[in-house]
Amino acid sequence: MPDQRLVIERLLLVIDAQDWAALPGLFTETARYERPGYAPLHGRAAIDHFYREVRIVAGGAHRLYGCVSGMYEVCCWGEFTGVSRTGESLSELFCDWFEIETDGGLIASRRTFFYRPAI
């Protein structure tokens, strides 16, 4: 089984580099991604489309502050700083929970949380 933290670090590097050709290969074919403010994304194609066309970020970088993992799950937290497609500065604390498949270490599920009042 691959080191789950390395799987997550690779994902964030791919996103920060906007290496969209590599992104789908990090997820299972039926992966699910849940993110505040968006309908759940189902499958590689939907996740790829989100990052290429929908996500408001023009560029930036993730910084991991911590990560804990079990056999099939990993939770990490950190901060993203960057700029939006409209030129607005972005700074967001986040926490992500992942399910990683044991064969090949692909991401089967991702759920992102942001540190903002919601209710």
Image: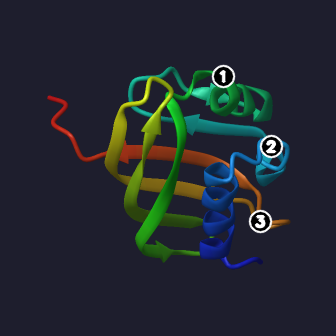
Q: Which x, y percent locates residue 109? A: 62, 47
Mark sitting earlier along the chain (1/3): 1
Residue found 51% across the figure and 27% down from its top: 85
Give the labeled residue for mark 2: 24
Camera-nearest residue between 50 and 16: 16
- Report the Cα–Cα distance between label 2 and label 1: 14 Å
Give the labeled residue for mark 1: 53
Residue 100 placement: quadrant? bottom right
Camera-nearest residue between 36 and 69: 36
Residue found 64% across the figure and 27% down from its top: 50
> Around disc 2, counting alpha carbons within 10 Å, would you say few (fewer than 14), some (14 to 19), or many (20 or more)?
many
Q: Please, what is the three-letter code of the amino acid marked with disc 3? A: Gly
Q: Is residue 81 left or right of residue 18?
A: left
Q: Secondary structure beneath disc 1?
A: helix
Q: Is residue 92 left or right of residue 118?
A: right
Give the labeled residue for mark 3: 105
- Report the Cα–Cα distance between label 1 and label 3: 26 Å
Mark sitting earlier along the chain (2/1): 2
Q: Which x, y percent locates residue 20? A: 77, 41
